[in-house]
Amino acid sequence: MTTEQFAELFRCYLAPFSSPNAHVYLGGAIGIDTEALVWLAEHTRVALTVAVPCVLADQPEDAVNAVRHWQERKRVKGIVELGAPSLGTVAYHARNRWMVDRSDFVIGFPRGDVPSGTWYTINYAAEKGKPRLVVPI
């Protein structure tokens, strides 16, 4: 997807939930996480917290740069480094559970029906009885 396509997606599915008193947790990865961070930082006043499995420096360079850029502009309220010993499925799932556990509502943008971290997170939110919005991309 292009940046413009992501922007349209976010206008439709993030904007309605982006009141100034909202708090959004993002995964800090490249792709949809970074695209959502940039869009939310530019177009809303929600509080933004980025959670990463290990430390921010372990994320892809473009993701780190986006987080730092918006942190310097006081748009990222917090960066949570969960300190996993290494990156991998276990660490990503722990990060996703951490975000869900602190959320009242979960929005997921899965790519198809293929098992993924996004589907894991959506299913975990369901197990926890959290309302969710699933927007396939």
Image (cartoon, rainbow, N blue to C red):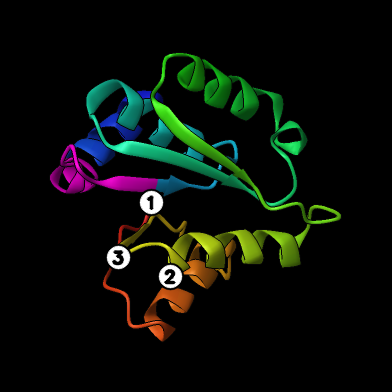
Is residue 68 shown above or below 134?
Answer: above
Rounded to the nearest angstrom, the CA distance separating label 1 from label 2 is 14 Å
Tell me which corner region of the image, top left, top right, bottom left or bottom right, holds residue 12: top left
Q: Which contiguous range is marked in magenta?
A: 12-24
**Total number of numbered labels?**
3
Secondary element under disc 2, as helix, strand or loop, is helix
Toward the viewer: 59 or 114?
Answer: 59
Of callouts 1 and 2, the N-terminal one: 2
Residue picked out by circle 3: 104
The quarter of the picture where the N terminus appears is top left
Which mark lies nearer to you, 1 or 2? 2
**Residue 45 is one of the magenta-drawn residues:** no
Residue 35 rendering spot, x and y as whole percentages? 44, 32
Toward the viewer: 115 or 14?
Answer: 14
Tell me which corner region of the image, top left, top right, bottom left or bottom right, holds residue 105: bottom left
Of callouts 3 and 1, the N-terminal one: 3
Contact? badges 3 and 1 (CB < 8 Å): no
Of callouts 3 and 2, the N-terminal one: 3
Which mark lies nearer to you, 3 or 1? 3
Toward the viewer: 21 or 35?
Answer: 21
Residue 122 rendering spot, x and y as whole percentages? 43, 70
Is residue 130 shown above or below 10?
Answer: below
Q: Mark 2: which amino acid? A: Ile
Residue picked out by circle 2: 122
Q: Residues within 10 Å of mark 1 (few under 14, many from 20)?
A: few
**Residue 19 is one of the magenta-drawn residues:** yes
Toward the viewer: 64 or 35?
Answer: 64
